[in-house]
Amino acid sequence: MAKWTPKHEAPEPLEGPVVATITGGTVLWFLLFLVQLPFYGWFDDHGHTWWLWTCLAGGGLGLIGIWYVRKRDAAMKRDAALKAGDAAE
């Protein structure tokens, strides 16, 4: 089997509103948890309490994600400013 070699360059990654996307997803996870919370008894009777805890875990991991993408965004802006400063000199 021959080794695969790419025939063209890989495209640049797309950058979008990452912080807003992660924040929106985190809010959605917490909202889903709060909407399901009044029905805890039904979930418990049917063995589906993991649905609630999955939403809570998603919200908690989303908080870590928000922290991460905000730090990443700040680092990218610092790097761009540094490069712009070097180019100006």
Image (cartoon, rainbow, N blue to C red):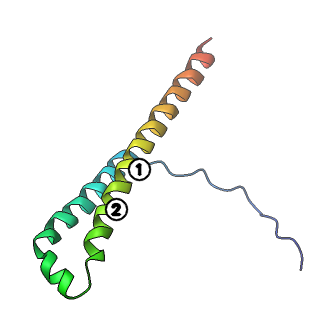
Judged from this view, the residue extending furthest toward the left is 38
Query: Where does the image place residue 68, in percent across and percent down from the top left?
Result: 45, 43
Tell me which residue sits at (43%, 44%) in the image.
69
Q: Is residue 17 visible?
A: no
Residue 66 placement (x, y as % from top left): 37, 46
Residue drawn at point x = 59 percent, y = 14 percent = 88
Q: Is residue 64 visible?
A: yes
Q: Nearer the viewer, residue 51 or 82?
A: 51
- The amino acid type of the residue labelled 1 equals Gly
Task: Please state the horizontal and vertical placement of residue 36, each as a whole percent of the image.
Answer: 16, 71
- Which residue lies under the disc numbered 2? 58
For the C terminus, the quadrant is top right
The residue singled out by tag 1 in the image is 65
Residue name at image x 82 percent, y 70 percent: 4
Using the numbered discs, state the Cα–Cα distance from disc 2 to disc 1 in whole angstroms.
10 Å
Report the disc number at residue 81: none
The residue positioned farthest toward the right in the image shown? 2
Q: Looking at the picture, how far across and down is residue 26, in whole percent?
A: 30, 55
Extreme-top residue of the structure: 89
**Element class at badge 1:** helix
Quarter of the image with the N terminus in it? bottom right
Residue 48, image quadrant:
bottom left
